[in-house]
Image (cartoon, rainbow, N blue to C red):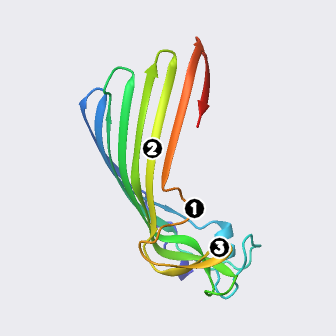
Amino acid sequence: LDDYSDFGRHASPRLGLVYRPQEDSAIKLLYGQAFRAPSAVELGCADPDEPCRLPAGLQSDPYLKQVRATSLEAGLRWAPAPGHRLELSLYRNDNRDDILFSSVSTTGQLGYFRNFDRTRHQGLDLSWQGRVGALDLALAYGRLDATYQAEGVLRIGERNLAVQPGMRIAGLPRQSLKFSADWRVAAGWSVGADL
């Protein structure tokens, strides 16, 4: 039971400060902490003495720490013209004890879930929303820098990867662009599309 001493001992506080110099604009600063408990699949394949391949049947149930995240976000929102709104957010999220699939060795195919010291997700989100005639339009851009902040050997797909602090996390898009349009056909009716 000593291994499980941190379960139930974490709070998820979030503190925000918003300044509105005008009705349609705002400046925000947010700070938060969060955590998550390991999932059943992660616990079922978390023993380095009984490694598994994914997808895996549940085997042992060793201890994994809860993932703890600390985030900081700053942003602006303003309306440059009637019916238009721009938003900008800068954020940084540091995860401690993240749960990642680790390899038993640099040459083996077996692995297990384990706590990884630190990972970081930081970036910016920029969006515009506007109304042009009968169209409601939105355009959003995201830039993400997701990196490992510790050393380790991880199992990524069909291969092992020795990661170093600052190395980019694979599988997460560095940039994203989203566009949506809704056409107000008649009162209470609209047709829309997202890209």
- Could you say which quadrant of the image residue 92 lies in? bottom left
Q: CA distance from mark 1 to mark 3?
A: 23 Å
Q: Which residue is mark 2?
A: 141
Residue visible at 32% across and 47% down in the picture: 16
Q: Which residue is mark 3?
A: 43
Residue visible at 33% across and 36% down in the picture: 77
Which is more N-terminal, label 2 or label 1?
Answer: 2
Amino acid at the residue labelled 1: Gly
Callout 2: 10 Å neighbours few (<14), some, many (20+)? some
Q: CA distance from mark 2 to mark 3?
A: 36 Å
Residue visible at 29% across and 31% down in the picture: 25
Element at badge 1?
Answer: loop
Image vertical order of residue 121 relative to residue 103, above or below: above
In the image, which is nearer the foreground, mark 2 or mark 3? 2
Q: Quadrant of the N terminus?
A: bottom right
Which is more N-terminal, label 3 or label 2?
Answer: 3
